[in-house]
Image (tube, coloured by chain):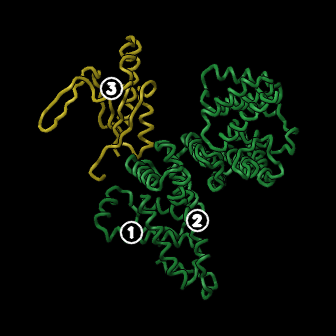
Amino acid sequence: MQYLLLIYANEAEMAGRDAPSMATMIAEYTEFTKGIVQAGQFKAGDRLKPSSSATTVRVRNGQRTTTDGPFAETREQLGGYYLVEAKNLDEAIAIAAKIPGAKHGSIEVRPVWTREG
Amino acid sequence: MAASKFARCGHAKDRVLPRELDEIFRREAGRVLATLIRLLGDFDLAEEARQEAFAAAVEQWTSRGIPANPCAWLISTGRYKAVDRLRRDAVFRTKVMNRELASAEVDAAFPDEADDATFGDDRLRLIFTCCHPALSSEAQIALTLREVCGLSTQAVARAFLVSEETMAQRLVRAKRKIRDAGIPYETPEPPLFEQRIGGVLAVVYGVFTEGYAATSGARMVDAELCGEAIRLGRLLDELMPRHPAVLGLLALMLLHDARRQARVSHAGDVILLDDQDRTMWSQTGIAEGAALIDQALSIPASPSPYVVQAAIAALHARARKKEDTDWPQIVGLYEVLLRLQPSPIIELNHAVAVSMVDGAARALDLIDSLRARGEAGEYHLLHSARGRLLHQLGRDDEARAAYAAALDFAMLEPERRFLEARIASLNECRSRG
């Protein structure tokens, strides 16, 4: 099965980090990504720009509206994702738990809807 | 194929009584379902298959006698019926086959090699699946009662005080989550196993406490739920022998249950430990619980909180008169428990035990420091314990206020009646004095 691992973190807290702490985090992510690529579990993954750069689009009755900011205001914001291949939820949870962001933020594990259901 | 398995019980000509069939169905329902879920890879399909197997058994066993291994017969027939249905129902088949769930390996010989170990493994798989931490704790308890204990949806709904419809929806959602999220039908491997066993035990204890002190409404004790929880505990002990936490939990439940009869009056009122008629305690339950604690303590491992709690319950249960209670040892065990599993409720119980050794004033200090930290402020038993200690210290006005605060947070009718009675008796003292 494929799972999307959504990485949520407190942006304000992230923005307040100093350079060495950012460098450590980036190194941890590089290491983690290398691991799941080698294990054949990696499908895709990216870091996202901050939610202040987000735009929300809706189309109602053919009318397009755009609003500044993310869809929902929450304490933690979506900051990145991985798309992984895992045997089952337990394996997906094990991968999610190794994401460096899991130590301070939260990882949402979502199974991907495939043709088979 | 199934017919050849009719090794008759040697009295094929004897009539098979409906009662006998019922008994077999009740006994085998859990094992049959657990194995069918593994073979078919789908809860609903397995439940339907079991129904059909039972229906076929009623028809065939009545005329041909009960097979030598009824469980294997039921599983084999159930799987055959399900596969037959999948073949007939092309849409269903596409859906299920594509999910690779019903890689039912349709022709793989199953029942011939099936033994008690296979059935046991399947039951454990089912327990771990129903108690998966990705499900809400409510859903875990409901699924376990429905799928592992085999309670009807109606009975599970009654236990949760919700309508049957609400419970049916909750169960459907939980099963859908198992399927959609890819929750595996597996007993986890170590080291995950030790982590997950805690969740399983929490579900079993949750069933028990739901039965022992329903959180709202008029009932104080639901004996049926307590019985189911103890049966689950026994099943876990059978499937995972000599596991200290399993032994501890089973002991704890047996020791609490041994006092059940003495805990509520005929009128449905709470009777505190001090006032219970100790001759009503079940000595069989107490002896079994105590033996399990000894077994748990003989296994070298770090102490499980369940074993410590059970040991505290055993010290209460072994005192034939309340004056015989070994309070200093109880205080010591609560201190161990506080290190293993700190919580405001355990702190409160520790304070109450301290009052029996060092007096009410010392205990009141402990409770007030707990209260000052803002923890457990809405816990009615904290205020109720304060009320008792204040009364012992002769501070009746404060005691009355504490009982009134307890009344603000108590939800159970019998507990509310108990608190109202305390306030009334304090008022009487005042008017008399």
Tell me which chain appears yellow.
A
The amino acid type of the residue labelled 2 equals: Asp
What residue type is disc 3 on? Glu
> Which residue is tagged 2?
B115
Please provide percent x and percent y for residue B141: 54, 48
Q: Is residue B111 above or below residue B220?
A: below
Label 3 residue SS: loop
- Mark-to-mark CA distance, 2 and 1: 22 Å
Q: Position of residue B142 (x, y in %)?
A: 51, 51
- Distance, label 2 to label 3, CA atoms, is 55 Å
Determine the colour of chain B.
green
Extreme residue in the bottom direction:
B13
- SS at mark 1 in the image: helix
- Judging from the image, mark 3 belongs to the subunit labelled A
Q: Quadrant of residue B215?
A: top right
Q: Position of residue B308 (x, y in %)?
A: 72, 38
Q: Residue at x 56, y 39 (%)?
A: B195
- Look at the numbered disc 2 and give the secondary structure of its residue: loop
Q: Is residue B358 visible?
A: yes
Q: Is residue A116 above or below residue B403?
A: below
- According to the picture, the residue beneath numbered tag 3 turns out to be A73
